[in-house]
Amino acid sequence: MIYLDNAATSWPKPPAVARAVRDAITHSTGNPGRTSHRSSMDSAILIQECRENIAQLFAINNPLRICFTANTTDALNIAIKGVLAPGDHVICSSMEHNSIWRPLTALADLGVELSIAEADSSGVVSATTVERLLRPNTKLIAMLHASNVNGAIQPIAEIGMLARKHGITMLVDAAQSAGSIPIDVEAMHIDLLAFPGHKGLLGPQGTGGLYVRERVNLRPMKEGGTGSDSNSPHQPIYYPDRLESGTLNLPGIAGLNQSVRYLLQRGVAQIERHESKLTQHLLAGLLKINGVTVYGPPVGVPRTAVVSFNLREMDPVYVAAELEKRADIACRPGWHCAGLAHRTQGTQKTGTVRLSPGPFTKIKEIEIALSVIAELAGED
Amino acid sequence: MAHRLVVFASLNQVALVKRALQRNGVYAEMLRTPRCLLHTGCSFALRCLVEELTLLQEICSTYKIVPGGFFDDVEESIPTLDNELLDS
């Protein structure tokens, strides 16, 4: 299989990931925080090690401010619903994934004021556009770092600086950037960082996390057993216990720990260079094919490894099916769970075909994909 | 060698401090809080050498962790776990 669907979930994973998941299930793995036998304590140390590795990856100075979640959507909901209350104002971009757009729309029905900062034709929102939308009651800026539809990268450091200047909490959705482009929560002024474990971080599905800056305190979305202060009816005020009720996904976190170790060793900047080379090659090749429309930033402009295109009037689902039938190429057609972004780039009627290379994709595989697309274009 | 118990609110905090101590070449043992220390409201403890307490306090300060208390390492109190309070 030629796997070009890394924006949905990455594959393959570093071999150590599967070994760690297997070991976590095969060997005795106690429930961390619930008792004191060796197995339970070992689990706690493993989870702590993973927190520390993630902290290193994102330049987070206190690993206890990283809370594990099931995925990015989970983390974004915890962040958004933990900050906003009726009467507050929030700004997002017109490129958001449904994981921000839908929770904000739901809150807007309950009295939260929502403004959408319009992106330019390539999918980028400027800090100036965001600044124009600020109100005295603006409490949160919630924004994706990179688009899952067209790979456009938002100027998070500039927007984060704007948020800091006005005392507004800055939430970043790193679903498409974590592990693919460098992230530094200090340099980028990020207060809340939601990230998946199974995409650019190369870990198992069912993992993810939320970083919460020390000055930010969230209302927990759920309360329950944390293994701490068990005689109290109240949720602990300290992190990560405040947001981590219930038993964690230890096998998943064990795998994630290994994948993050792999990233630290290989270097996110190296992966960024590798993926950029593949993506620019893909873009240049697509633009040479008659009838192809490519969306997002132009050739040569930095973007993540996401390329969306359409082939004349062909249904993207048909194109994706033909890519699989003819050359066993896995990609994603349709709307990519991002209706707002498709409205912004004018593809809301049909969606697009999305190709997303990853850290292990080879240039030869990109060339095969291009040749099949050219063949399809010639048949129309 | 003289040891002390330093109690913390959660296992997450204990695990962080233990790993930070390890990186400094210091061994510490993680324990669930014995019955006699439960009045602190904390759950887990580290058992470490008395002479390492300054380093431990520095680590707590770095990560903004407030230890629940420092106790003499009474040998017989350590294995006395309060099973009624263990979570399921």
Image: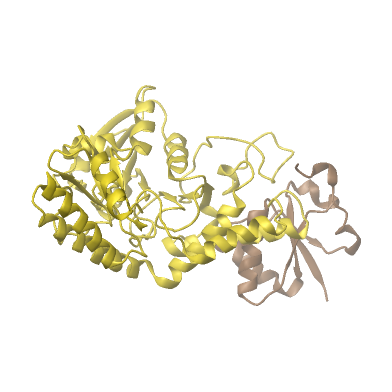
Chain colours: A yellow, B brown
| Residue A24, percent from left and from top | 64, 58
The quarter of the displayed image where residue A335 is located: top left
Instruction: Tell me if A232 is positioned left or right of A372 in this view.
Output: right
Which one is nearer the viewer's eye here, B71 or A232?
A232
Q: Is residue A8 above or below residue B63?
A: above
Residue A297 in view here? no
Locate residue A274, reporting x and y percent. 29, 68
Quick one: which residue is furthest to the right in this view? B76
Counting every numbered tag in the picture gives 0
Which residue is at a point 70% across and 59% down the rendered structure image?
Answer: A27
Within the image, what quadrant is residue A86 found in? top left
Viewer-closest of B1 and A350: A350
Q: Is residue A268 visible?
A: yes
Residue drawn at the location 33% of the way across and 57% of the way down: A188
Q: Is residue A14 left or right of residue A297?
A: right
Relative image position of residue A108 (x, y in whole percent): 34, 26
Residue A306 lies, in percent from the top left, at 27, 53
> Between residues B22 and A261, which one lies in front from this camera angle?
A261
Q: Quadrant of the N terminus of chain A?
A: bottom left
Work out whether A101 lies above or below A293: above
Q: Quadrant of the C terminus of chain A?
A: top left
Q: Is residue A346 above or below residue A295?
A: above
